[in-house]
Image: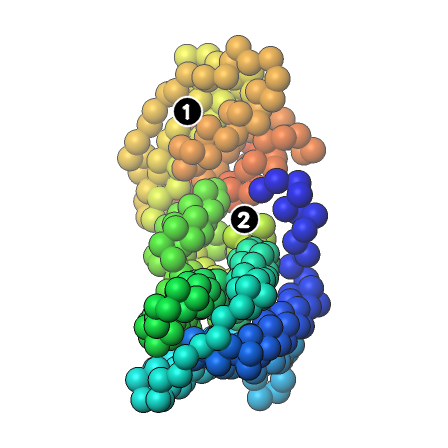
């Protein structure tokens, strides 16, 4: 989006969103006035139909403004807010559009024919009534999309319908100057266009009222955010829904923690990341279950091939990864991995820690305190335990682990 667009479009604050409801009412008054003057002077059925269209839209704009003001309020009877009120208004707008289409169709089919009088100034008035909604809908739609407001988006789409129908009116009046009686046909075309817009708005509004899911791309983005959290072992499911301009997300996952305070810290961090990455999130509800542990994976930095525990975490030449069964302390897997970051000059310890987290380690044996250093924060976020050991060898550290962890 260009810099000029940012200057032209107000922010997403509720007051600015509501302001566009007032703007819409003003635009409808102007359009209705233009079409009223042209309709009275010309006697055109198509212009009169468009004037009725404006009248209905004015009442709709009033309803949109009421919805924007009330949708974010919460009461004791509605503790989750009145967010869906905007979608109710969208459905109401669609129904009013259908009523408008019916009235126009009835006039076009059953009203006795009359000859319209067309002067150049009338054509100019219709052109003006085309340009105004075209410009206004461009900005209102952008504001509605940025604020995720279904009421504003619906209103902007209805103005787009005005652009088309007023163009049809212009063509009918121009044809009348050449003695081509297209007035009734123009009115029926307006009926089809209005009906199509009404159906689209009704469909979109009802999807939200019936708690249809968030779109697949948004759910995929949320899923990736959750799975990128190091402390998450498994994601059972994630779902979400729209309510008005806001989104609600719910997920169930398994964490590498068995401590309530740590679990709350992890879920709070996930919620913050989702709020930062996905716009218009009102609430994230995460159900977290602790991982049932039958094994623990230990890692120790080694200084040599004999299994001496290195006193320097990031400088260790190799790392031993050992998987122990907690039921009886049996070693089920043992691997020796070369330090892939041994030659790194900067952030060596952090990179090693991130690498080990990717290896799904549970406990890291260290000889020196890492307090205040980068690896501490990596392991803390991933809920990996750092355990200082007095043992000089890997076998001694594993014996300490048996005494502490085996059931």
Give the numbered dot on residue 277: 2
> For numbered disc 1, what is the local secondary structure?
strand
**Vertical relation: 122 (above or below) 359:** below
Q: Quadrant of residue 376?
A: top right
- Label 2 environment density (alpha carbons within 10 Å; few <14, some 14–19, many ≥20): few
Contact (CB < 8 A) between labels 2 and 1?
Answer: no
Asked if residue 109 can be seen in this view, the reply is: yes
Q: Residue at x 55, y 82 (%)?
A: 40
**Vertical relation: 117 (above or below) 241:** below
Q: Residue at x 46, y 17 (%)?
A: 339
x, y percentage for residue 193?
37, 69
Q: Residue at x 60, y 13 (%)?
A: 345
Left or right of 321: which side holds 267?
Answer: right
Q: How many marks?
A: 2
**Vertical relation: 214 (above or below) 74:** above
* Along the line of sight, the residue nearer the viewer: 137 or 273: 137
Asked if residue 199 can be seen in this view, the reply is: no
> For numbered disc 2, what is the local secondary structure?
helix
Nearer mark to the viewer, of 2 and 1? 2
- Would you name the residue on which mark 1 appears? 320
**Vertical relation: 323 (above or below) 338:** below
Q: Residue at x 65, y 53 (%)?
A: 9
- Label 1 environment density (alpha carbons within 10 Å; few <14, some 14–19, many ≥20): some
Which badge, 2 or 1, comes first in the chain's sequence?
A: 2
x, y percentage for residue 53?
48, 78
x, y percentage for residue 114?
40, 83
* Along the line of sight, the residue nearer the viewer: 299 or 8: 8
Q: Whole-Å distance between the Cαs marked 2 and 1?
A: 37 Å
Give the numbered dot on residue 286: none
Left or right of 243: which side holds 29?
Answer: right
x, y percentage for residue 325?
33, 42
């Amino acid at each position: 989006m260009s810099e000029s667009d940012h200057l032209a479009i107000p922010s997403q604050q509720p007051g600015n969103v509501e302001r566009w409801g007032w703007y819409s009412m003003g635009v409808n008054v102007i359009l209705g006035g233009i079409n009223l003057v042209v309709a009275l002077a010309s006697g055109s059925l198509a212009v009169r139909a468009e004037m009725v269209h404006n009248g209905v839209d004015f009442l709709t704009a009033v309803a949109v403004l009421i919805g924007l003001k009330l949708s974010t309020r919460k009461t004791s009877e509605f503790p989750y807010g009145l967010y869906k009120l905007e979608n109710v208004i969208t459905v109401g707008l669609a129904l009013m559009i259908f009523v408008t289409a019916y009235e126009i169709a009835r006039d076009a089919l059953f009203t006795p024919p009359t000859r319209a009088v067309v002067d150049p100034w009338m054509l100019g008035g219709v052109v003006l009534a085309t340009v105004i909604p075209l410009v206004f809908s461009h900005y209102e739609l952008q504001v509605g999309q940025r604020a995720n407001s279904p009421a504003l988006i619906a209103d902007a789409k209805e103005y787009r319908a005005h652009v088309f129908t007023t163009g049809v009116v212009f063509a009918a009046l121009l044809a009348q100057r050449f003695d081509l009686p297209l007035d009734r046909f123009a009115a029926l075309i307006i009926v089809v266009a209005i009906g199509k817009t009404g159906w689209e708005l009704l469909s979109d509004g009802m999807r939200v009222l019936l708690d249809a899911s968030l779109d697949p791309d948004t759910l995929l983005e949320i899923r990736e955010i959750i799975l990128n959290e190091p402390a998450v072992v498994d994601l059972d499911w994630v779902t979400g829904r729209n309510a008005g301009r806001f989104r609600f997300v719910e997920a169930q996952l398994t964490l590498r923690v068995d401590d309530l305070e740590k679990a709350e810290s992890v879920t709070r961090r996930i919620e913050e990341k989702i709020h930062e990455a996905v716009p218009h999130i009102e609430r994230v509800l995460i159900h977290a279950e602790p991982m049932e542990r039958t094994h623990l994976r230990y890692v120790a930095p080694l200084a040599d091939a004999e299994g001496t525990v290195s006193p320097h975490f990031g400088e260790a030449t190799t790392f031993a990864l050992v998987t122990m069964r907690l039921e009886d302390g049996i070693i089920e897997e043992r691997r020796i991995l070369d330090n892939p970051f041994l030659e790194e000059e900067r952030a060596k310890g952090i990179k090693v820690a991130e690498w080990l987290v990717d290896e799904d380690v549970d406990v890291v044996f260290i000889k020196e305190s890492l307090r205040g250093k980068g690896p501490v924060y990596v392991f803390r976020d991933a809920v990996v335990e750092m355990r200082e050991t007095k043992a000089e060898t890997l076998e001694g550290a594993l014996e300490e682990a048996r005494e502490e962890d085996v059931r």
